[in-house]
Structures are given as structure tokens and as C-alpha cells.
Amino acid sequence: MTTATLRRWFVVHKWTSLACTLFLLIVCVTGLPMLFSEQIWDAFVGDDDPPYEVLPPGTPNASLDEIVGKARALYPEQIVTNVAPDDDEPAVLVSMAPSWQALKDDDKFPDRHSGHWIKFDARTAKVLKQSPPVDAPKAPRTWTAAILGTCTRLHMNLFAGLPGALFMGAMGGVFVASLVSGTVLYGRFMKRLPFGSVRRDRAARLAWLDLHNLLGAAALVWALVVGFTGLVNELQTPLFGLWRVTDVRQILKPYAHLPVPAQDHLSPVQAAFDTARRAVPGNAVTSLAFPGAPFGSPVHYVLWTRGATPLRARLFTPVLVDARTGNLTGAYPMPWYLRFLEISRPLHFGDYGGMPLRILWALLDVMVIVVLVSGLVLWAGKRKVATDARLRALGYDLDDGDQAPVSALAEGAR
């Protein structure tokens, strides 16, 4: 590698690292509690749901039509908007509202929420819990909810909505560029030293450099995967928007001007679930939206299914069932760009391997934090020194003619 090439890679690594370090620190620090959010919530908050009734093993679930019928009997003047079986507990959540229009109008009033939900025991169809009435005083927010909510919003978009998400996606791309440039520098540098060497007997700056390089190399593959998948995840809003205005619009175009039928005349909900399971074998049905839902069809149940294994759990396939007849209209696999997005999610979140994988993700996250901090230390210590002087100070001879190959230095994230 020539001196000119070394300088270029050095400058790329320095400025890409500097540009994203602060935001990467925010992402890494907020990502730690997010990895264990369920455990933190259970430990400090828990829930006040009544205990489930003890029933003999293998007790079958009640019909979803019975559950929906009980929900409508409780609120006969309202409509059912969504039915969602719980993934982890024997429960079914039924969402209701005064009307679809009331839900649309809620968007104009941030403090108004017309919808509510009822939680049923999936086996007995008994009501377990309901959301508080609309006019009920709001329960005080717990510190746990405030901290986890703040971490999530900082991690996703810095409290800046879609612009913040796109900015964080750009920072993910810059982070990948810093990793690639750092790898190029480190690969040449390691020809001079055994892998894992930390020169504690030399200047403190060299020890920081070696630690920076060692931990960076150890976490390199993980950081590349998490950085790139983080970039992809930040694009979810525009990608889903693209899907809605292309594929979804074409699928629903023949039904767009049809009236929404009264819910008294719809086909059975349980049959729609069974039809969706047959349409996508091996998938679990996670929810059903009633006709008239936003981004849905005026005459179809929209059922969302997902893979039943941990690695496929984020691969969703929507199914349309005609709510007037109960007949299958079709199952529609996501386009390639959304499949790519969905595949990237378990790789980013590390939630497909249970607690051992979460702990590994946390350890690697801490390693990246140390790499970022050590990079700042290296940059702060020599920020006023020219690039060539920095390299010579660390013992590397540079060819002023820019022709002879030189050993590359894996300089810190400055």
C-alpha cells in the first residue's frame, strides 16, 4: 500500500468515525436496556392481570366467534376493529371503536383515543381485563416506562420522527464505512504484531491504539451486521409506504369503491382464521383486521401470518379472506425489499436465540462502546497533529515519494 493510499484510508476512517461516534454511542447505550426490556418490565412493573383459570392440559380454545360475540354484546353500539391471539399466553385481544371514522378523527386530536380493547381468556372466553374508559384519569407513568420509552425513541429516531429515522440510517451507513476503512488499515497493521498484542510497556497512546484495534477486530463481524441491518430497519417507513402505493393498491383496486358491510352480516371470524392457516401452511395467524380498516379492504378480512420458527418469526405474509362469503381471495408474500427488511430484523435485535444470544449481543455492544470511547481518546490526544506526523510518531516510515509500499496503521476512530 502506498503512502498516498494509506493517507486516503486514514482520512476516510477518521472522518467517518468522527461523524457517527456520538450517534453510535447513543445507539449502543440505549440498545442495552432494549435488549432486556421484557425482563426489566417484569422485574420493576409487572402486570395486574388476574391469574388464568387452571384447566386440564390440552383444553381446547373457545371459538373466536364466541369471543367476538361477547365483545359486541358488551358494546353493542360499537364495531370490532381487530382480533389478535396472544403469542405467549392463552389470551385473545379484541379491539373496538365507535366507528372507523372516529379512529380516523383521532389523528387530528393527539389526546383523544376512541378505541379500546378487551382481553379474553382464549380457552373459556371469559373477560380478563379491559382498557380504562376514555374519560378515566390517566394512570401515572412509571419510571420504568419512561426510561424504556426514552431509550426506544432515542435509538430509533432521536425523537425526530421519520427525518430522525432516516438520519440514523445514514449514520449506520457511515458507521459501516468506518468499519471497512478501519479493517483495511488494521489488516496491514497486524503484519507487524501478533494478533491480540497490547503494548503496555510503550506509550499510553499505543496501549489505547492496540486496545482499540483488538476489540474492534473481535467485534467487527457483529458490528458490520448490526450496523447494516440497523440502516435497513430505519428505512421501514418509506419501504412499507412504497409497498402500499404499489402492490397493495393494485390488489385492492377492484374493491376500493365497495361499501363496508355491516358487521352483523359478515362471515365467521374463526373460519377466516382457519382459511388463512390453510393458505399459508407453517405460518401462525397473528391478527385479523375487519373490513374498513385503514390500508385494508372494505369487504375483506386482512389476516397477518408469520413464520412459526424463531428465524422466520418476523417474516409476515398477509392473507385476504372475503368477509361476505368466507372465501379465500389470496395470500400475498411481501416484495423482495420487505422480505430483506424482515430478515434483517432478528439479526439486528438478536431475539431469535433466547437469553444466551441476548447476553452475547450485550457483551458485543459493550465492546463496541469501548472501541468508540478509545477512538475518541486517540483522536483527542493528537487532534492538532498532521496525519503524517501521527503515523511517524507511532514508528511508521512514510515514503515521501508516495511510491513504495508501506505498512498500514489501524488508527483509532478519531
Image (spheres, grey):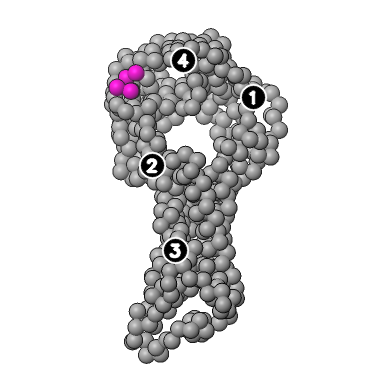
Which residue range is magenta in the image? 274-278
Quote the CA–CA distance across marks 2 and 3.
28 Å
Instruction: For marks 2 and 4, give the CA distance.
Output: 35 Å
Task: Name the mark nearer the viewer: 2 or 1.
Answer: 1
Residue 342 bears which disc, if any? 2
Mark 3 or 4: in front is 4
Residue 178's x, y, as percent? 45, 65
Closer to the N terminus: mark 2 or mark 3? 3
| Disc 2 residue crowd, few under 14, some 14–19, many 20+, Cα 10 Å | many
The residue mark sitting in front, 2 or 3, is 3
Residue 217 image offset from top left, x and y in percent: 44, 63
- Tag 1 or tag 2, which sits nearer the N-term? 1
- Rounded to the nearest angstrom, the CA distance separating label 3 from label 4 is 50 Å
Q: Which disc number belongs to residue 57?
A: 4
Task: Say whether residue 5 is magenta.
Answer: no
Residue at image position (48%, 81%) is: 391
Q: CA distance from mark 3 to mark 1?
A: 46 Å
Residue 48 is tagged as 1
Q: Nearer the viewer, residue 410 or 242?
A: 410
